[in-house]
Amino acid sequence: MDLLVEQIIFFAFAGMTVLAGAVVVAVRNPVHSVLALVVAFVASAGLWLLLEAEFLALVLIFVYVGAVMTLFLFVVMMLNIRELPSREGFVRFLPLALFALAAIVAMMVFVIGPQHFGLAQYAIPAHHGADYSNIRELGLVLYTHDVYPFELAAVLLLIAIIAAISLSFRGRRVGTRSQVPSAQIAVKSADRIRIIKMASEPKVKR
Amino acid sequence: MKQDILLLIWTVIKIVAIVLPLIIGVAYLTMAERKVISYMQGRIGPNRVGFGGMLQPIADAMKLLFKEIIIPRVSNRYLFLIAPIVSFVPALVAWAVIPFGPHLVLANINAGVLFVLAMTSLGVYGVLMAGWSSNSKYAMYGAMRSAAQTVSYEIAMSFAFVGVLMAAGSLNMQNIVVAQSGGFWHWYWLPLLPLFVVYWISGVAETNRAPFDVAEGESEIVAGFHIEYSGITFALFFLAEYASMILISALAVTLFMGGWLSPFQGIPVLGAWFAWVPGLVWFVLKLCFFLYLYLWMRATFPRYRYDQIMRLGWKILIPVTLVWIVVTGALIELHVGPWFS
C-alpha cells in the first residue's frame, strides 16, 4: 500500500475520531452523544487496524460498540430526556473549563510529546506480510511473559461479577410469588384439563 | 498506481458478484418462506404473479419501491432515515469473509470470525435507532426487547464460536473449513454438537426470527421497532433481516458443516463420482438446508414468552457452552477421534 493512501486513511479516521469526540460533548441530545461516541469508537478501531492490531480493533468494535455502548444507549433511552435544558452556567464555568483544558493539553504535550514519542525514539513500525498474525503474537505474549498480570486481571473481573450479582440479588423474600420454571416445564396436559368421555347426541330427526 | 486502481475495480466487481446474488436470494427467500409455510399449513400460497407465483417477490419489491415514505412529524428525522441503512449495511459487510470455495473468498483475513462477530453486533444499532427515533411507544418496546435479546444471545453465540476456534486452531474462515476436511463425519457438528445446537438457537434469536421474534410480535406490539416505517425504508429492514438470516446460515455451514467441502469426501465410489462438483454447489445446498430450518421452525413453534427467552439464554445456553468448551479442550488434548488427531 502506498504511503499516500495510508495517510489518507489515517487522516480520515483520525479526523472522524476527533470530530465525533467533539460532537459527544457539543450536542444537547444525550442519545446523539452516545451515537457520536459509537462513531468515535469505530473510527479509532480503524486507526488500530492501520497499525496491524486487528485483534484489538475488532474486539473494540465487538465488546465496546456491540455490547457496552448498546447498554449505554439502553439506559439513556430509558431516562427519557428529550433535550437537556439550555446550557446554563456555560459562561460562569467557562474560565474554569478553559483552565482545565489548558492543563490537560499541557500535560499531554509534556508526557506524550514528540520528545518522548518522536520518530527518533520510536521508528515507524515495520509492515508485516500477509502471514503475520497479530492474534498469535498477542496470545504468545499474554500467556507466557505477562501471564500473571493477565490472570490477576481475570480474577479481578470475576470478583467484580460476583460483587455485582451479590449486591443486586436480595434473595427470595417470604411472601413474594415467583415462577418455578422446572415445574412449569414438567406440566402434563392431564394436570390442567380433564377429558370426559360422553355419548354423542342422538341424531335429530327432521 | 495503475495497478491499485485495477485492483480496486476488480474488488468492486467481486463485491457486486456477492451482493447481487444475495439480494436475489433474499427476494426468493421471502417467496420460499411464504410457499413453505403455506404448504405446511395446508394452503397454496402466492400463485398469481408469473409462472406458479415465481414473480411475486419482484412485484412486492416494485410495490415497496413506489410506496410513499412517511416520516412521523415528531420523529427524530435524520436518525429515522439512517436507522434502516445502519441495520442493512452490517448484514452485507460480514459476507466479505465467508469462503464460497477453495479460492472463492473476497477477503481471506486472519481474524475472519472476529470480523463477522464485530459486524453482526453492529446490526442492533439500526433497531435501537429506529425504535427511539420513531417516538412511538410500540417501536420503543420493540427496540428494547430486541437490544436486550441480542446482547444476551451474543454471549452464547461467541462462546459457541470459541469451541470452533479451539478445534480448528485458527480464526481464519478458510482454515476452519480446511480443518474439517475428510467427509461428513469429520465436520465439527459432531464433536461440537452442543455448541452447534446453542449456536443455531442463538443465531435464530440474534436475527429476531420465530420463535424468538418478540421484537416484532404482531399480537403484542404490532410490529415492534419498524412500526412507523413505510415504503423502501421498511423494505430495507426487511432486506436486513433476511440477509442476516442467510448470513447466520452461511456461518453455520462454514463453522460446523464443512463449508464448501463435499459430503461424499472419503467415501470410496461416491467421493470420486462427485469430485468434479464445485464447492460453491455444496455450500449453497447446505445453506438452503439451514434456511429451510428457519422456515420450518417458524411454522412449527409458538413464540417464546419474553422472560423465558432471557432464562433460556442466560441460564441454559451459556452454561452449556462453558461446559462444552472445557470438554473440547479435553478432546483436543487427548487427540480424540478423526477430528483432533
Image (cartoon, coloured by chain):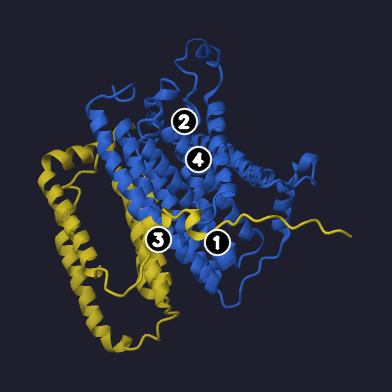
Chain colours: A yellow, B blue
Q: Left or right? Give the position of B130 relative to A53.
A: right
Nearer the camera: disc 2 or disc 1: 1
Which residue is labeled 1 in the image? B216
Residue B27 picture location, percent across and down: 65, 45
Between the residue at mark 4 and the residue at mark 1, the CA separation in whole angstroms equals 21 Å
Which residue reaches farthest top? B269
Q: Amino acid at mark 3?
A: Val
Between the residue at mark 3 and the residue at mark 4, the CA separation in whole angstroms equals 29 Å
Q: Left or right? Give the position of B63 relative to A42.
A: right
- Mark linked to residue B249: 4
Q: Quadrant of residue A18?
A: bottom left
Between the residue at mark 3 and the residue at mark 1, the CA separation in whole angstroms equals 27 Å
Between the residue at mark 3 and the residue at mark 2, the CA separation in whole angstroms equals 34 Å
Secondary element at tag 4: helix
Between the residue at mark 2 and the residue at mark 4, the CA separation in whole angstroms equals 11 Å
- Asked if the residue under mark 1 is in contact with the one under mark 3, i.e. CB atoms within 8 Å, the reply is no
**Chain of the residue on which disc 4 is drawn:** B
Which residue is labeled 2 in the image? B259
